[in-house]
Image (cartoon, rainbow, N blue to C red):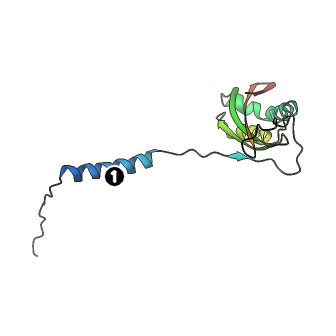
Amino acid sequence: MPATGSTRTVTRWSWCDAARSFASALAVATSVACVTTTSTAYLPTPGQPRLSVDDARDEVDALLRTECPRLVQAGKPSQEARVTVDVGPTGDVARARLTTSTGDEQIDKIFGGVAARLHFLPPEPGALEGPTAPGHLRMGYSCSANAAVVTIQLL
C-alpha cells in the first residue's frame, strides 16, 4: 500500500494583506457580536374604548391583582417600565413602545397594551412635527401577598 503524506507550505502575507484580513474578521465579529434589540409596538385595538390615565391605572390594577402572587413568588414584587407613546392630533395614542422593560413579559404586555389605549388632551396646534407627537410615561407596580399598587406617571 503506498504511503500518503502531507507537505506543509507557507504563504507570506504582506502587512497590508494581514491588516485587511484582520479588518474583515473584526467586521464580521463585530456584526455578530452586535445584537440588535427587538422592539415591540403596541397598537390600540379598534373598537376598544380609550382610557384616561386614571382609567388606565384602574385597568392595570385589576389585571395586576391576578399576577401579584406569581410576581411575589418570583422575587419581583415591584418593578417599573418606561414607555414611549405616539400621540395623534386628537389626543389618542397611535402606538406605544416599552423603552425599558419590567423584566416580566406578561406585565410588559399589560403595560404596553394599556398604554396604547390612552387618550390625552390633543397636542397644541403646531406641536406636531409629523403625524404624531412623542410622549413618555413611567409605569410601575408594587405587589404584596394581598395588595397591588399601580403608578402611571407622565414624564
Res. 123 image quadrant: top right
Q: Quadrant of the C terminus?
A: top right
Instruction: Give the vertical position of 9 relative to 37 (above or below).
Output: below
- Would you identify the image quadrant in which residue 3 lies? bottom left
**Residue 41 drawn at (x, y percent):** 70, 46
Which amino acid does the dot numbered 1 rest on?
A: Ser
Percent coordinates x, y for residue 106 in the rendering: 72, 40
Name the outermost residue toward the left: 2
Q: Nearer the viewer, residue 95 or 131?
A: 131
Q: Which residue is mark 1?
A: 24
Residue in the foreground of this view, choosing between 16 and 10:
16
Q: Is residue 24 left or right of residue 89?
A: left
**Is 150 in front, or is 153?**
153
- In the rendered image, the residue lying farthest to the bottom is 1
Element under disc 1:
helix
106 relative position to 7: left or right: right
- Above or below, 35 against 4 in this view is above
Q: Quadrant of the N terminus?
A: bottom left
Task: Kindly indicate the quadrant of the structure image that contains residue 117.
Answer: top right
Number of labels in the image equals 1
Q: Residue 151 location in percent, x, y?
A: 78, 26
Residue 137 higher or lower than 133, as above or below: above
What residue appears at the point 68 percent right and 32 percent down from the top-left corner?
82
Q: Residue at x 70, y 35 (%)?
A: 83
Q: Please tell me how crowded label 1 is: few (under 14), some (14-19), or many (20+) other residues with Cα within 10 Å.
A: few
Percent coordinates x, y for residue 87 in the rendering = 78, 40
Looking at the image, which residue is at 60% across and 46% down?
A: 38
Q: Residue at x 66, y 31 (%)?
A: 74
